[in-house]
Amino acid sequence: MQIVNFQADHLHAVEPQTAQADVVNYIDAIDRQMLAARGMSFSALADGKIVGCAGVVELWPGVGQAWAVLSREALDEPITLTRAVLRELERIRRERSLHRVQATVADGHGAGARWLAFMGFEVEGLLINYGPGGRGDHWMYGMTT
């Protein structure tokens, strides 16, 4: 797995895993240029194919919202993927002096919740009707320094 700088069109290249399939319906509504802020996002390639994109959007000084769109292929290398994401999250936290990074995961997406917990995020509460299109509950996770 190779990590490269994120480009806005990379989101269209990722075929999201089943648990994130609904994100395809909202990709064009996402401010992809915001996601592409210099040094804040990255893409993962496997055999030259974009298999995932992730990063952090700075909400205000010191606080960032982590995000990820991952394909089934990205999940085939969980250790490599997790190490790469942790390395990049730490780089972003350090470079941007973030004292808090938060992330959400859809209610019922157990693998996603376990992954966030494994990376050091702690569950903080349930967000009702938070998902794309105002549908679906999501759990908020936070990581502070």
Image (tube, helix red, strand yellow):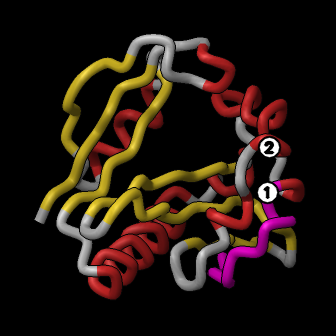
In the displayed structure, 98 sits above or below 5; it is: above
Counting every numbered tag in the picture gives 2
Element type at mark 2 = helix
Find disc 1 in the rendering and name its residue: 11
Indicate the secondary structure of the residue bearing disc 1.
helix
Between 76 and 100, the residue placed more toward the observer is 100
Q: Residue at x 21, y 53 (%)?
A: 143
Residue 3 sits inside the magenta stretch: yes
Q: Is residue 78 left or right of residue 61?
A: right
- Residue found at x 66% / y 62%: 53
Q: Is residue 5 magenta?
A: yes
Residue 33 percent across, percent down from the top left? 72, 66
The answer to which image quadrant residue 16 occupies is top right
Q: Residue furthest left?
A: 145
Label disc, if present, on residue 2 of the rendered structure: none
Please state the horizontal and vertical placement of residue 73, each as a whole percent of the image. 74, 53
Q: Is residue 104 above or below residue 7?
A: above
Point 78% across, 35% down: residue? 26
For mark 2, does the 10 Å Cα neighbourhood hold few (<14), some (14 to 19), or many (20 or more) residues? few
Tell me the quadrant of the picture where the C terminus can be found.
Answer: bottom left
**Image x and y of residue 25, in percent:** 83, 30
Q: Amino acid at mark 2?
A: Ile
Span highlighted in magenta in the image: 1-11
The location of residue 103, given as percent across then percent down, is 39, 45
Query: Going 24% across and 23% down the picture, which residue do you hit?
Result: 125
Kindly identify which numbered label has been placed on residue 27. 2
Asked if marks 2 and 1 touch (Cβ < 8 Å), the reply is yes
Say what amino acid the circle numbered 1 marks: Leu
- Which is more toward the observer, 96 or 6? 96
CA–CA distance in space, label 2 to label 1: 7 Å
